Image: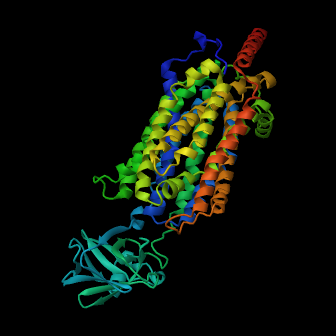
């Protein structure tokens, strides 16, 4: 590592504090909105609205495929814009508003209350005999009351009901294998049914037969029932269970709208960070602010669901709607702060720059050897860890805690919190380290933290001392936040090199193409990860995994990221854009621009 004296940022290249904070507020929009959507959408659509997981996966995947097309378009569009407000700011303002609106709209599912299923656990007076669960009830003039609850009544559905009550008019031909009842609660009418579960706790709608003052509940799918519950909704379940696929089209459309808005916002925002300052070190400070503020905002994402479950809301559906509207407003305000506080330094320089076509810009970007080396190095790190994404959870549960999920979940939660806190704190010394040893060496240092942290798992995956896993968690989180914050600063330097070689400023294209390769790598890794998990011998149906499966889980989870990161380090050693070269390019461009200005006078 080189600790010789380095360049000091001149005063004219230093950005005011409020601009760096404003840019960080802008980073919060993308980080928080995407993280929150990923955390909440499966809960809302699969758990609450009972959409089939396969359909949910399709609705979630298609917008990411669309990203491959929209990212380069957004980058090229922003580079070629010549408005009075700049090349980036209009998109940040409009895109931020659209992100906030689309984020809230994703969870504002039409008629969501119709798909909401209420659950009442039935524990009292339940008697299990062979394959049948019996529960006592009391006949009254308003129907029959279960011994577990008296705040609602049940009655059999009559032809009169189906003719006069709207929710009963739905055909129940698809509800074979279960018995439907009319439930009245708080003067509202619902469809109700009983569900039973075996040892796996998977509840299935069942048939119910009245025998005197007892309800006998059973299902051909469960030979030894252990638990029973009552479910009611405005929509009847199908013969396949409570699955409701009607919101699929809405989710697909709104997800496409949301991710398009995110692209329209995030690509110009990233490009703006590239051009806010010409200084090698000040760029690092800009992205340090962005990472710090964005990661603080990201901590809020897991708490949105808890807020939605507060008793002030009628149910979780209403809670999610209100909370997400609030979050949408915060996103819009953050984007507005970014738009009004940040300045485009290169706007006046490129006013007369010729517009570059999309395909030509994409090809030129991908031919930049410095850029290609940086992309390859980071793609190797990305896929290395994405290939084994989730393996850590299985190792914690089945190896470290020998199948004790309750104990494992506590340490997993603690490690998650430590990861988040380290990500916030770890960015603070990043700019200082970069000033001392340069960006390339700082990234190599960060990559070494990833290698050492992962290899330490050989020791820290310890059944006797499980809390040793905190050590690799800290090292991995610190390494990740440093390298993925610095890559944007390094891309900004590459844009200077590109201007030197081509005479054009194309920050939007570079940010978009880097994002394009990043998303392509993640998409490929998702597919490979599933096959890799299968080769380990992992079996989800087993209470405890075999020793062979546990060995291969640890082998791949520890070795694969470490090996690919070492290769990335070797590639980065040949990275040519050092601090000296960056400042040399800066001076050449400064003289060139001065000459161009003199020639136009």
Q: Position of residue 97 (x, y in %)?
A: 50, 40
Extreme residue toward the front, this view: 464
Q: Residue at x 41, y 76 (%)?
A: 198
Q: Position of residue 191 (x, y in %)?
A: 35, 76
Extreme residue toward the bottom, this view: 212
Q: Nearer the viewer, residue 115 or 40?
A: 40
Q: Residue at x 53, y 54 (%)?
A: 395
- Can you say whether 411 is above or below 294 in the image? below
Extreme residue toward the left, this view: 141
Q: Is residue 498 left or right of residue 394?
A: right
Q: Residue at x 60, y 14 (%)?
A: 13
- Can you say whether 580 is above or below 248 in the image? above
Q: Nearer the viewer, residue 379 or 106?
A: 379
- Dividing the picture into quadrants, the one containing residue 443 is top right
- Can you say whether 218 is above or below 245 in the image? below
Q: Nearer the viewer, residue 33 or 222?
A: 222
Q: Nearer the viewer, residue 555 or 222?
A: 555
- Dividing the picture into quadrants, the one containing residue 359 is top right
Q: Position of residue 152 (x, y in %)?
A: 24, 73
Question: From the image, which quarter does the C terminus lie in?
Answer: top right
Q: Is residue 277 visible?
A: no
Q: Is residue 370 visible?
A: yes
The tally of labels here is: 0
Q: Position of residue 225 (x, y in %)?
A: 38, 79
Question: From the image, which quarter does the N terminus lie in?
Answer: top right
Q: How is the image coloured?
A: rainbow
- Can you say whether 491 is above or below 476 in the image? above
């Amino acid at each position: 590592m080189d600790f010789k004296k380095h360049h000091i940022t001149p005063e004219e290249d230093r950005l005011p504090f409020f601009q760096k904070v404003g840019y960080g507020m802008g980073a919060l929009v993308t980080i928080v909105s995407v993280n929150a959507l990923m955390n909440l959408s499966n809960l809302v659509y699969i758990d609450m609205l009972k959409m089939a997981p396969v359909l949910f996966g399709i609705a979630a995947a298609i917008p990411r495929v669309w990203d491959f097309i929209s990212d380069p378009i957004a980058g090229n569009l922003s580079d070629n814009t010549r408005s009075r407000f700049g090349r980036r700011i209009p998109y940040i303002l409009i895109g931020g508003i659209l992100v906030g609106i689309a984020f809230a709209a994703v969870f504002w599912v039409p008629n969501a209350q119709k798909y909401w299923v209420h659950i009442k656990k039935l524990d009292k007076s339940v008697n299990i005999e062979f394959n049948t669960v019996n529960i006592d009830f009391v006949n009254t003039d308003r129907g029959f009351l279960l011994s577990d609850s008296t705040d609602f009544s049940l009655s059999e559905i009559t032809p009169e009901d189906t003719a006069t009550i709207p929710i009963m008019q739905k055909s129940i031909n698809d509800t074979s294998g279960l018995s439907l009842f009319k439930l009245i609660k708080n003067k509202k009418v619902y469809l109700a049914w009983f569900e039973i579960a075996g040892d796996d706790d998977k509840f299935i709608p069942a048939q119910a037969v009245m025998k005197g003052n007892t309800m006998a509940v059973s299902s051909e799918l469960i030979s030894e029932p252990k638990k029973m519950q009552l479910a009611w909704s405005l929509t009847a379940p199908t013969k396949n269970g409570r699955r409701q696929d009607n919101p699929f089209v809405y989710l697909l459309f709104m997800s496409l709208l949301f991710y398009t808005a995110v692209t329209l916002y995030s690509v110009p925002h990233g490009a703006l960070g590239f051009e806010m300052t010409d200084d090698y070190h000040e760029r690092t400070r800009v992205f340090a602010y962005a990472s710090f503020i964005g990661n603080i905002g990201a901590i809020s994402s897991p708490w949105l669901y808890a807020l939605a479950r507060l008793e002030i809301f009628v149910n979780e559906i209403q809670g999610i709607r209100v909370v997400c509207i609030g979050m949408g407003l915060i996103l819009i305000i953050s984007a507005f702060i970014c738009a009004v506080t940040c300045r485009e330094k290169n706007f006046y320089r490129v006013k007369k720059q010729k517009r570059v076509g999309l395909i030509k810009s994409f090809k030129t970007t991908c031919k930049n050897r410095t850029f290609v080396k940086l992309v390859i190095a980071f793609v190797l790190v990305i896929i290395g860890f994405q290939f084994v994404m989730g393996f850590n959870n299985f190792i914690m549960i089945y190896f470290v805690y020998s199948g004790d999920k309750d104990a494992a979940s506590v340490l997993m939660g603690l490690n998650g919190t430590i990861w988040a806190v380290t990500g916030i704190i770890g960015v603070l010394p990043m700019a200082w380290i970069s000033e001392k040893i340069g960006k390339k060496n700082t990234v190599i240092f960060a990559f070494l933290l990833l290698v050492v942290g992962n290899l330490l798992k050989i020791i820290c995956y310890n059944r006797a001392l499980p809390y040793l896993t905190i050590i690799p968690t800290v090292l991995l989180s610190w390494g990740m936040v440093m390298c993925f914050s610095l890559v944007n600063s390094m891309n900004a330097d590459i844009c200077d090199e590109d201007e030197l070689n081509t005479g054009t400023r194309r920050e939007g294209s570079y940010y978009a193409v880097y994002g394009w390769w990043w998303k392509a790598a993640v998409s490929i890794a998702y597919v490979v990860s599933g096959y890799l998990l299968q080769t380990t011998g992992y079996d989800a149906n087993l209470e405890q995994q075999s020793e062979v499966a546990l060995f291969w889980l640890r082998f791949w989870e520890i070795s694969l990221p470490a090996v690919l990161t070492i290769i990335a380090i070797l590639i980065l050693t040949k990275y040519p854009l050092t601090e000296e070269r960056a400042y040399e390019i800066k001076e050449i461009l400064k003289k060139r621009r001065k000459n161009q200005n003199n020639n136009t006078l």
